[in-house]
Image (tube, rainbow, N blue to C red):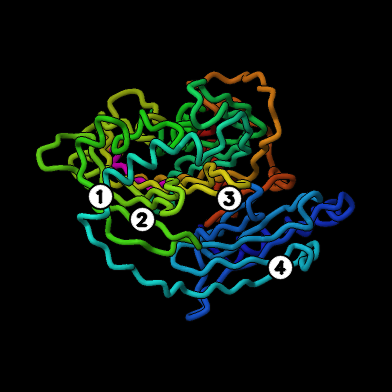
Amino acid sequence: MYNPVFRAFFSLLLLLLVNQVHAQQGIISISGKIIASDDGRPVHQAGVSINRKGIGTATNAAGMFALIIPAANLADTLKISCIGFKTKLLPITGLKNGEQPNIVLEKSTTELKEVTITYYNALKIIQKAIDRIPENYINHPHILRGFYRMYTYNDNTPLQLSEAVFDVYNFGYADAHADLFRLIKARNEKNDRDFNSLEFAQKPNNIFEEDVVNHLHTCGFLNEDGLTKHQFEVTGIVDFKGYQAYEIVFKEKPESGEKTYRGRMYIDSKTYAFIYFDFGLSPSGLNDPGSGNSVERSLMRTGNVGIGLILNNSKVSYQEVGNKWVLSGVEGDNSLAVKDPVLKYDYTAHVKFNYQITAVDTTQKESFNSKIGRNDNINAYKSNGDEKFWKDYNILLSDYDIEDIFKQVKAINKAIKKKDK
């Protein structure tokens, strides 16, 4: 299933098919690979964006990316950044339509500054960051164009794959109004043989809450209750994608009960903006069936199928657009124990989730009508698709052959129907 050579070839071929159209529209389509300077290995999850404009994508596990650059941004600068590497800026005017650059990133050599823990009070830094959310983040109506992909599998067997492009209308990071959701395109296929009685039903509300900063009240380690259940420690000031940032690690306090987390966060030492979170449920949180993490919230099940959470991790990053911050992307990695004596299920389901902001529109003032409710299943609105499904959109290149997975699931379901006749 995982064939990086074929996947890269297919992705680049698809881009060639649309490059001619884009050239006629004044749009530039580029694709390429990002590697490390010291060993030549691909750089995973490197951000590739138009600097401070909110248009961008990220690299896959093979270091590959593809980006459509609008005509209005041809005089801007391309920014390539990744944790642990020096940020690189390239003028877009030097890029040609259809170009496939190999970009080399140098490892960051900035060491941790000495930290006096008594001086750098972690809770005070976090509270200052919370208090400054209205001034640090976009605090007026704006639209985020997003792309998500959720892939669930067991070893080499695909269980469910869903993708969507959508718009989120955000009233502002300090505004209490609920976000609005507008679906652009979506597709979904579920394996009814090996994933019967189960389905990941992605809902707009689940997507909204991936934005930790905009939904602090649902964040189990940053809301009022979470701050009292966890202990926080400043481990240093680091160079984080070109920003000098406080690195704060956290874990549950002894005897704090369930629904606790472990992880780290980075806060810009100049503006006190939250810029990155890497976290997951603590061991006690994993054992709590009601922890309310995003995987559990989106999973629908019937019958007697048993589910146990084995692994839970989320990475949430933010970007500057102009001089304000806004969500950039979310990466989730989860594993579930699936058991059902009737269906004879006893396996581990791996769930990979990506949510990437590909464009930010700060000029749009009017909200839009949302035809999908906050708790509706997005998969119920799937579009008809083929291998050119995303040709007009910025998305994340996959770590696997997406089209082949869709074909496999359809073949499995077709065989079931044929057998039942």
Residue under numbered circle 3: 402
Answer yes or no: is residue 346 visible: no
Q: Secondary structure at mark 4?
A: loop
Residue under numbered circle 1: 121
The disc labelled 2 sits on which kind of residue?
A: Tyr
User: Which tag is nearer the camera, tag 1 or tag 4?
Assistant: 1
Q: Secondary structure at mark 3?
A: helix
User: Which tag is nearer the camera, tag 2 or tag 4?
Assistant: 2
Please report whichever mark, 2 or 4, sits nearer to the chain's N-terminal start: 4
**Range of magenta residues:** 332-338
Please report whichever mark, 1 or 3, sits nearer to the chain's N-terminal start: 1
Left/right of residue 91 with respect to residue 241 in the rendered view: right
Residue 221: x and y in percent read 29, 38
User: Which tag is nearer the camera, tag 3 or tag 4?
Assistant: 4
Residue under numbered circle 2: 246
What whole-number distance in Å separates the C-alpha atoms at marks 3 and 4?
21 Å
Residue shown at the point (45%, 53%) measured from the top left: 270
Residue 29 lies in quadrant: bottom right
What whole-number distance in Å separates the C-alpha atoms at marks 2 and 3?
38 Å
In the figure, 82 relative to 411: above or below? below
The disc labelled 1 sits on which kind of residue?
A: Asn
Q: Secondary structure at mark 2?
A: strand
Q: Secondary structure at mark 1?
A: loop
The residue positioned farthest toward the bottom in the image shown:
38
User: Which tag is nearer the camera, tag 2 or tag 3?
Assistant: 2
Residue shown at the point (10%, 38%) measured from the top left: 255
Please report whichever mark, 2 or 3, sits nearer to the chain's N-terminal start: 2
Residue 307: x and y in percent read 28, 35
Residue under numbered circle 4: 100
Left/right of residue 231 with respect to residue 354 in the rendered view: left
Mark 3 touches mark 4? (CB < 8 Å) = no
